[in-house]
Amino acid sequence: MTIDLGAGSRLDRSGIREVMDLAASLENVLHLEVGEPDFPTPPHVVEAAQRAIADGVVKYTVSRGLPTLRELIAAKLRDRNGVDAGADRVVVSAGGTPAILETLMVFLHPGDGILVPDPGWPVFALSASLQQARVLRYRVRPETGYLPDLDELAALAPRARVLVVNSPSNPTGAVYDRATLEALYELARRHNLAILSDEVYEDIVFDGEHVSLSALDEDGRVASIFSFSKGYAMTGWRIGYVTGPSAFVETLVKVQEPVIGCPSYVSQKAAEAALTGPQDVLATRRDEYRARRDAVIPLLREHGLFVAEPRGTFYAMANVSPLGADTYDVARRLLLEERVAVAPGETFGPGGAGLVRLSLAGSLDVVTEAVARVAAAVSRA
Ligand SMILES: Cc1ncc(COP(=O)(O)O)c(C=O)c1O
């Protein structure tokens, strides 16, 4: 039998995963390629999960997630995000990643246009491609602090059905201010676009505040995606959630059933503990990421690698254009020759040309040494 591999066989893999795979086969590598906090999951969260396992809480749950967890999330959305959704408009998912795919399965039909940031996280375009959608990249540029150009967006909008907004942004570290988000919402309203708002880095904002697009939603066009991965350092637990208008949420629940069945019961109990336990862990870790940014940005400036000041997340772009035009090749050489793993800029779109993304989620010693090695390689070029 021949298996028709369909659209999936034509998908590009994320360049980040390619660097990770190659790096795994080498020794003494400084890892700045992946967006994973180096902090442990808070102990009270781990203990709650251990208790759940000991108590046999290891079964299926309803697809949309435990009512108790959804109530806690609804309270968090109300108190911290100003989003009055209620538990009925919350769906728990296995992290932000499947939530993005599922949301686009609801929003998109084959051939529809979808506006994704360039540079932007590769999973937006990958998930859109799985829906056979047309990816329309909108540039965000370092000169404007990587904020979107509204005129450029307005020119593309007539061909689109969905607008993806990601603030705080991976890979740029941009944090959109309220006025920018309001303008994006107005643009979406004018062109009748649905908005996928990826807010998984909401806890890691250094300058300004995180504003949820769902808090600005007046006519039911925004789906906001959140995760426990980054703020609570729970990447491997695979737990996150979505809120949106009622009709969207009801369809999302139907889509979730064949995609993940339900989120892990154990991880849902862990997420409950994360929300009910002490929250100071979020600020403590954010401050640590800020300290790393404040240490690294002057180094990037000093070595001529600086691109833009990140206002959130734990990423920074570095200008490595003297090393060559193909950033996949540059990333491969930095790994093989300098033992520094970074993400090639072009994996985030053409807007990443000449750049690599550094993850500052590792210890300051590692990040500092890695920047020194990249700088040395650039100065030799
Ligand atoms: C912008 C963005 N959205 C979503 C995610 C998904 O995270 P998770 O699936 O762990 O919740 C990531 C992870 O790197 C990300 O960078």
Image (cartoon, rainbow, N blue to C red):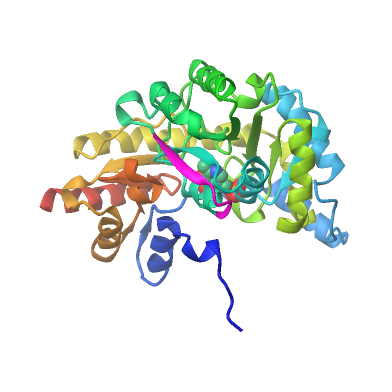
**Which residues fall within the magenta stretch?**
130-138
Tally the numbered discs.
Answer: 0
Residue 279 lies left or right of residue 181; in this view the side is right
Question: Picture quarter containing residue 25?
Answer: bottom left
Question: Picture quarter containing residue 237?
Answer: bottom right
Residue 257 lies left or right of residue 380; in this view the side is right
Say which of 375 and 14 sits in front. Answer: 14
Q: Position of residue 344 (x, y in %)?
A: 34, 52
Q: Position of residue 340 (x, y in %)?
A: 31, 57
Query: Residue at image x 68%, y 52%?
Result: 94
Regarding residue 276, the answer to whether it shows in the image is no
Residue 136 within the magenta-colored segment of the rendering: yes
Residue 320 within the magenta-colored segment of the rendering: no
Q: Position of residue 352 (x, y in %)?
A: 33, 43
Q: Position of residue 228 (x, y in %)?
A: 64, 43
Q: Residue furthest top?
A: 179
Say which of 177 and 69 sits in front. Answer: 177
Position of the N terminus, as image quadrant, is bottom right
Regarding residue 194, the answer to whether it shows in the image is yes
Residue 276 lies left or right of residue 129; in this view the side is right
Q: Residue furthest bottom?
A: 1
Query: Residue at image x 46%, y 32%?
Result: 312
Say which of 248 and 287 sits in front. Answer: 248
Query: Residue at image x 57%, y 33%?
Result: 203
Query: Residue at image x 85%, y 61%?
Result: 59
In the rendered view, tell whether residue 223 sits above or below residue 230.
above
Question: Picture quarter containing residue 224?
Answer: top right
